[in-house]
Amino acid sequence: MRGTADPPAATAPATDTAIAAVLAGRSVRPVFQPVVDLATRAVVGVEALARGPAGTALEFPDALFTAARAAGRLGELDLLCTERALECALAAPVRPPLLFINAEPAVLSQPLSPRLIELAAGGLPFRYVLEFTERALPAAPASLLHIAGVVHQWGNGLALDDVGVDPMSLAFLPVLEPEVIKLDMGLVRNPHAPHTQEVCAVVRAEAARTGAVVLAEGIESDDDLRTARSLGAHWGQGWLFGRPGRIDGGAHRYDSAAAGVLGAPRPDFHQPAGTPFHVAAGHGPVTTGTAETVAAALTRMRETVTGTESAVVVLSRPDTGVPGITADLWQLADRTRSVITLDQPVPGEFAAVVIGPGHGYALCVRPGAAAAFEMVAGEKIPLIAAVARVLLNRHR
């Protein structure tokens, strides 16, 4: 027998009341874990981690966020956690150069709170880095790219968290193009595994292309530190450097130059203007093609997909079609991880990208003179990522 525990319906009101009290009292209690330069051990910033009221059933984040989700108030809690992290960092006797804050992917489309806008838009004496996990990328791509644009508009940066847990995070890495790439602790624990080697090869290539900083999580010993550096990490965090605690509870030796290590903000990068074809034309040559050359490009795209289970297809085909182009979505999909079709197709243009870990293919086509087509196609990551961004911004 299960015993005599109350059914969920009986306990829900108590949980709802507890979450309501947390929100009304703004009683989220952030704790902070140092992020360090692995070469010097200087602290470059801190990551804010949410805690509920001490000594209660909602003290720890799993229970806190589960209860908020059940009560339908996850968005309010997520905003409050961000507000409290910023407030505590502003009130600290010594402010960190960088403040890492997690974003809850399920509520990216919510409006920002007036308090958060007041704190972040008015100018901060440090840069914050908003962390997304791979769960956010396919779930709400347009909302994520909008938030990314706002973060850059306010002078701050982005991080992709838990890289290595799900191959989809590698596929979307060039689309988000974050300033910080965070290696999941599982990679540090298993540095010689084929999966680890594959992930780190893609991450190193992306970091070399964009200037992103690679950060390793879960460093608990000097051996972990050496492993993290061998995997390509320059920054790290873990119990070796400090457990989560009060922001003024440790004698941190902050590296005041840390904020300048991250790339400069790019306010328009994540929401490019123009149609997919116009964006593609800025990254590759426009050629004149026939139905046969378009068919050959589609074949090349299918070959890119085949056997790549972690690849993602993003496609826009107008309802009226483009004369001469017959593209079967499911042929393009093949064995892909995900297929995203635009809710708002681009009139008069066919555009598709395949994005896999460190590789892909992009094709943009529109009618040209007579029976010819204008087309841009290629395998270069900047082209693929740029077309993906403009397509995903149209996906609601």
Image (cartoon, helix red, strand yellow):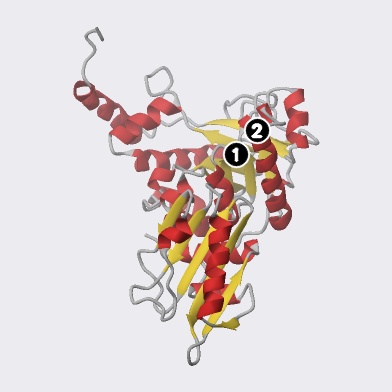
Label 1 CA crowd tier, 10 Å (few <14, some 14–19, many 20+)? many
Local SS, label 2: helix
Is residue 354 at all visible to an observer of this figure? yes
Looking at marks 2 and 1 on the same chain, the residue that comes earlier in the sequence is marked by 1
Local SS, label 1: loop
With respect to residue 327, does 227 lie above or below? above
Is residue 153 at all visible to an observer of this figure? no
Q: Are marks 2 and 1 in contact (CB under 8 Å)?
A: yes
With respect to residue 14, does 112 lie above or below? below
Query: Where does the image place residue 370, in percent across and percent down from the top left?
Result: 48, 92
Query: Where does the image place residue 78, in percent across and percent down from the top left?
Result: 41, 40
For residue 15, the mark is none
Query: Where does the image place residue 361, in percent across and percent down from the top left?
Result: 58, 63
- The amino acid type of the residue labelled 2 equals Leu
How far apart are the alpha carbons under marks 2 and 1? 7 Å
Q: Which residue is mark 2?
A: 187
Viewport quadrant of the N terminus: top left
Q: Which residue is mark 1?
A: 164
Viewer-proximal residue among 157 and 380: 380
Viewport quadrant of the C terminus: bottom left
Residue at the image point whose x is 77% and y is 36% from the top: 229
Viewer-proximal residue among 89 and 209: 209
